[in-house]
Amino acid sequence: MRILVVNPNTTASMTAKIGAAARSAAAPGTEVIAVNPPDGPVSIEGYYDEVFSIPGLIAEIRRHPDMDAYIIACFDDTGLDAARCATSAPVIGIGEAAFHMASLVAGRFGVVTTLARSVPAIEHNLKRYGLMERCARVRSSEVAVLELEEPGSNASARILDEMRRSLAEDRAEAIVLGCAGMADLAGRLSQEVGVPVLDGVACAVKLAEALVQLGLRTSKVGGYAPPRPKSYTGIFSHLAPGA
Amino acid sequence: MRILVVNPNTTASMTAKIGAAARSAAAPGTEVIAVNPPDGPVSIEGYYDEVFSIPGLIAEIRRHPDMDAYIIACFDDTGLDAARCATSAPVIGIGEAAFHMASLVAGRFGVVTTLARSVPAIEHNLKRYGLMERCARVRSSEVAVLELEEPGSNASARILDEMRRSLAEDRAEAIVLGCAGMADLAGRLSQEVGVPVLDGVACAVKLAEALVQLGLRTSKVGGYAPPRPKSYTGIFSHLAPGA
Amino acid sequence: MRILVVNPNTTASMTAKIGAAARSAAAPGTEVIAVNPPDGPVSIEGYYDEVFSIPGLIAEIRRHPDMDAYIIACFDDTGLDAARCATSAPVIGIGEAAFHMASLVAGRFGVVTTLARSVPAIEHNLKRYGLMERCARVRSSEVAVLELEEPGSNASARILDEMRRSLAEDRAEAIVLGCAGMADLAGRLSQEVGVPVLDGVACAVKLAEALVQLGLRTSKVGGYAPPRPKSYTGIFSHLAPGA
Amino acid sequence: MRILVVNPNTTASMTAKIGAAARSAAAPGTEVIAVNPPDGPVSIEGYYDEVFSIPGLIAEIRRHPDMDAYIIACFDDTGLDAARCATSAPVIGIGEAAFHMASLVAGRFGVVTTLARSVPAIEHNLKRYGLMERCARVRSSEVAVLELEEPGSNASARILDEMRRSLAEDRAEAIVLGCAGMADLAGRLSQEVGVPVLDGVACAVKLAEALVQLGLRTSKVGGYAPPRPKSYTGIFSHLAPGA
Amino acid sequence: MRILVVNPNTTASMTAKIGAAARSAAAPGTEVIAVNPPDGPVSIEGYYDEVFSIPGLIAEIRRHPDMDAYIIACFDDTGLDAARCATSAPVIGIGEAAFHMASLVAGRFGVVTTLARSVPAIEHNLKRYGLMERCARVRSSEVAVLELEEPGSNASARILDEMRRSLAEDRAEAIVLGCAGMADLAGRLSQEVGVPVLDGVACAVKLAEALVQLGLRTSKVGGYAPPRPKSYTGIFSHLAPGA
Amino acid sequence: MRILVVNPNTTASMTAKIGAAARSAAAPGTEVIAVNPPDGPVSIEGYYDEVFSIPGLIAEIRRHPDMDAYIIACFDDTGLDAARCATSAPVIGIGEAAFHMASLVAGRFGVVTTLARSVPAIEHNLKRYGLMERCARVRSSEVAVLELEEPGSNASARILDEMRRSLAEDRAEAIVLGCAGMADLAGRLSQEVGVPVLDGVACAVKLAEALVQLGLRTSKVGGYAPPRPKSYTGIFSHLAPGA
């Protein structure tokens, strides 16, 4: 089985970290291909960055048409709906993956993400998925995405602080880490706080494997129907449906 | 006052129709500039098309930095959140504009849009805005967007049919037309059905004028904070925040 | 265009302040007529006062049948549903006006009103309108309505305090002022806190103008159908439908 | 124990029928006093009629200050919030009474009311109470309120028709009769359809007795605090708080 | 009228206290029979205990087939749905009883229960009933169920503390006591805090009496249909439907 | 990895079919042990049957303490909360498993279950999980559970009929089969209708494997804390916590 993991930002070190996390979660027969688009923001922090990461994300999916499943490795599940239109193979966002898995091990989970500006997008996703019902609160640690890449930063301490507040003040029973760049922290932080701590990258890999093994593919009835053939003008003409 | 109306698809005839509708709704002192991006889909029908229209939409907003307000003339409110980050002037989507205005003249409104594939995106917006509570049902007429541009089509008859079903079966008290390309139909169809029929383009123009006159601009606290300065690589480098 | 602004309480100084606020928001061609009923409470603070203000409010609307639109200048949107039955011209409550406009400039708004006893009525309205989804919290400043009319009071300082709490503790991104008597404070307080601050009177004027210019009138299908002709006995006989 | 049952419309024959229904539900030691105000609409059919019935309703409550409990015998629970402010004795609306009792004998209930115009007000109440969650659908039989008073009308047949649709199409498990004027129909119609059929008048009497026996009175913290002393001008001056 | 009150745990002293509370709430003609099953947990504190109390609870109901109504005297409304299938006489849980009654005397109520582990089950019930809308927050006092039986414990002081927090921090307007073992505390604590304090046992008795007097029985359409005749194997064979 | 699949009813042929379905979904290294309790109903059809299946279910989990994960193979997720208290290994219900997986391949799914009486329990679960938001409607095929075991029945044709209605009338985009006894039908029915059809048994196996491989176990903070040590009397004494 081959799974394409797309980091929708353009920071190769983060792609490497995400790829490693994905591989370490993958089953023996699963090949993980981790890529990022050449075009777009170096990190995704809020709505503006998001929209410039999506064309590259879709292009990567189209460039790798023979995959068994696709993972979008941005916690905002950036471009998830469009990606589901672009292929009939399963597509999983790491945000939704973590929310669904957390719902299986806890009645109520908290989310700790990077910056305050990213909170509303995550809340919107939770509402759409229905899982806001299960979420105690989305908290920000005020750690920027690329700080997570800096060796000497105190990022994980600040994340841990916010996790503790989530447990004490919001009555969370498990914690979802709200950024792909936190993929390497779940294990250690779970030991610190004594509740399940979920990293979306690992969760998404297992869910992608599960869907593939079950033969489940995206429904093509309704919102995820294949895009209608039509022209796209200018720089996106090669990405038109059917092009 | 100058309002930029961006049709996020690349069909100039539709931009012209939208511009005319906007101008006919505008107050005397309001100048409407209607544009569409050079790059992207010729029509927006579903999630896939949407994401390729947004970079061009944002580019148009950046290209016209001195406007008093901006209108996104796609009923899905495509790229609305990102656009709100890109400027502190008010930005209004024609979908939300119609929903809010309909809420002022009816307890419960129906929406009649183009294709079934567009229904989920509209429903998601209604949920986010809170106004699903006021919406009887989102119906599709199975009229494609560009059919609305064809002189001899029976598009308006099919839309009218669906409007009548919305009133009879869903207990709607007003009808929102669910596509920018229907902007010229509201007046006539309202006479046919005897309830308010709302076109989002006209609604958005009035709301944009209202916000400007009240001196209200987008809050920069929270999700609509200006994007953090950072590099964008490749074809989007000129659209990086601060670039 | 002529807009009747009804202050449903009987305090003339407040009617004057509301009228001034409405006029200063109105477009050049808009004539604002500000009135209050002769019968009823001197201020509206909670459910009990509300119901004694509504017959007078409806009487004022009937007394001015040729208006293009009507505004109810009490933040509880007192009598809004009945008023919408009484005329087919648009009727707007200042509460709903502010909530809808705030939804266009912020993802999430806070409300700061007068007394704790008024909070539940405002919360009920927000739920009905669907916009509780967008509201961070309704807070009371414990400033009584008529204190807002007293020159030397520290009312605005106490309101400002509560606004700051709304931003810091509730993550509001904009503030709605929850009383018609605060109409003169929005501009100054917005400068203090650096986020949009909305006064419902001004918002309602712009929305009323917008509906009139769009030719949108209240739907007469459903809950806002004209009242059925019937007798009213006693002191209300002259207000019977058709009387 | 003495319970005041206020029919807020001014039709004495309906007051008599409601009084009889209340008495037949009352426990031996309960005295039912059924009254209607001298001023107001002869029937309540929609929002407009509602607001002219409330001052008279409140006046009746004030005129009978020594009651152990008060019942508002209009299915819209007209004036319920204001009435709760006016006394610390329990006040129960017949709509809420029926909804709560139906929730104890069925997972999901339907409501069959008089006219379509009354449906939105009932739906708003259900949302406020939280019990929309339990309601399958509010249906109208298009029987006017005073038709229920006409001996030879086919009103009950039309109501029965709509009850059958509620069971078959909406999966209701019990039926709430949505008008005080239907108080005499519950027993017979329940036998016809084989599920519980609830009349709000009887339900309210039992709930009022229950609250009195438990010593439970309306909370005076929050929205139901006693109205603040103040002047009312004009025809309502004698109904000012403290007057 | 005869009402069976089943304490689903096996602690006889608690059954006695519950029986006394029920009798003191009962009307003169009501006979209260208080029982507990011989098999099961000595107290119910969380999901695990719950499921071992239900077979005994159902057995008690079957053992007393001629009752007019049944009350389940555990605040989690343990086994309520199954019990409603087992008989067509009314069955009331003390949790739902208190929630419904609190909704009649306050806009918003708080719940104070025993242990944190019991909070999620209560929250689930509130959501199902629809009444989470009315609940300010479910708080735990960290008093274990059987501590309530110990004469010298400071249990009521700790409950009172939490009630005060509910009023001050959650804006509750009334308090529901969240354990059958608190049945004797309502009167005294209500005097301490000055708002209505509700004990579910007393509320359930009055509601059971009310339903019986109204002739209302559980709907047998839908989820509460009588169980289909079938075999049960092993230790439960005598409890099979029809056995 | 060893997974215990508990069919909570006592019909061995159904346990065998479920075991086979589980094994065919399992990864090579996964050992599936399928059991059913000796005590309880031969099929679970509604709330009454449910409660007599849970003690046996819990006993099976305790009897097999060394499993890596547990699956409850009843679509009502019978006893799921109690089971999660009984072990810290992951426990998955087949209902929730199917709902979560369906949410990854469709915006909106329908459920087709056996009897109407089972619909409310499934709806309650969907509400608790938050996923009612994603569910188009729960439909019953009026096929009894054990009919699914009869070779010559037309059960699958009736289920297929209802699936088609779900797609056409409810706008479902995928179908969840609402009974463990339908585990063998998913593949064939999916081909018939052309959308994803999900069987909860297979979904649960993959989710259980995923959780185990990720090292995720049930949170022991909150509602799933280990039951407090205490005595259980009578027939359940050996199942007391710590016993």
Image (cartoon, coloured by chain):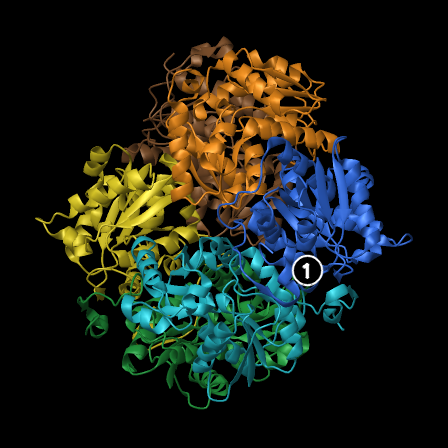
Chain colours: A yellow, B green, C cyan, D blue, E orange, F brown
Query: Image check: D63 left or right of C106?
Result: right
How many numbered circles does the render carry? 1
Residue reaching furthest front?
D243
Instruction: Answer above or below: position of E9 versus C218.
Output: above
* Front residue of this view, candidates F229 and E141: E141
List the residue tagged with mark 1: D50
Q: Is residue E163 above or below residue B66?
A: above
Please name whichever residue, E39 or D6, is drawn nearer the observer in this view of the structure.
Answer: D6
User: How far across and how far down the image is residue B18, in percent?
Assistant: 47, 82
User: Please, which chain is the residue tagged with disc 1 on?
Assistant: D
Q: Looking at the picture, how far across and down is residue F11, in whole percent? A: 56, 21
On screen, residue A142 versus residue A104, left or right, reads left
Q: Residue B10's quadrant in the figure?
A: bottom left
The amino acid sitting under disc 1 is Glu
Q: Is residue C243 left or right of residue B120?
A: right
Q: Residue at x 57, y 60 (%)?
A: C50
Q: Position of residue D109 (x, y in %)?
A: 66, 43
The quarter of the image holding the N terminus of chain F is top left
Question: In terms of secondary structure, where does tag 1 sit?
Answer: helix
Instruction: Determine the residue located farthest toward the right in the rendered image.
Output: D152
Residue F35 seen in render: no
Q: Nearer the viewer, residue C212 or D64?
A: D64
Judge from the rendering whether residue E217 lies leftward or rightward of residue B72; answer left or right.
Answer: right
Q: Picture coordinates of residue D65 (x, y %)? A: 66, 46
